[in-house]
Amino acid sequence: MSWLMLVQFGVSRKTALLAGSFVWLTIFGVFWLGLFNIYLATRPIMSIALPLAWVEVVVAACIVRWSVVRK
């Protein structure tokens, strides 16, 4: 999904940040909200895991941006 957004909207840092944030929101946001709603995740765990997952996905989107720019 990051690759598609970068190809369609340009290979800027802003697009990479938005692409990573959207991927994070669709995957981790929905997943962790579901776990929280059925009491399998606590607030302290979510307050640590979600920001770390966001950083990881944004870094991955920046790596995708780097590879698209190199082509």
Image (spheres, rainbow, N blue to C red):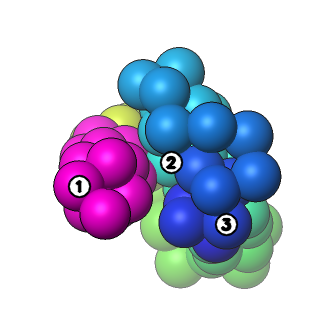
Residue 14 horizontal/vertical position (percent): 53, 21
Q: Please state the total of marks drawn on the protein image.
A: 3
59 shown above or below 11: below
Figure quadrant of the N terminus = bottom right
Q: Residues within 10 Å of mark 3 (few under 14, many from 20)?
A: few
Q: Residues within 10 Å of mark 1 (few under 14, many from 20)?
A: few
Q: Which mark is residue 70?
A: 1
The residue depicted at 53 percent of the width and 78 percent of the height is: 40
Please tell me which residue is depicted at 76% across the width and 52% down the height of the picture: 8
Q: Position of 40 compared to 38: left or right?
A: left
Instruction: Say whether disc 2 or disc 3 marks the residue closer to the N-terminus.
Output: 3
Q: Find the magenta span and give its range.
A: 52-71
Residue 12 in picture, x, y percent from top left: 49, 27
Which percent across, then down, holds residue 2? 56, 61
Q: Is residue 44 visible?
A: no
**Camera-nearest label, 2 or 1:** 1
Give the camera-side residue of 35 and 62. Answer: 62
CA distance for labels 1 and 3:
16 Å
Q: Is residue 60 above or below residue 65?
A: below
10 Å neighbourhood of mark 2: few (<14), some, or many (≥20)? many
Q: Secondary structure at mark 1?
A: helix
Residues at marks 2 and 3, CA–CA distance in whole angstroms: 12 Å
Residue, disc 3 = 4
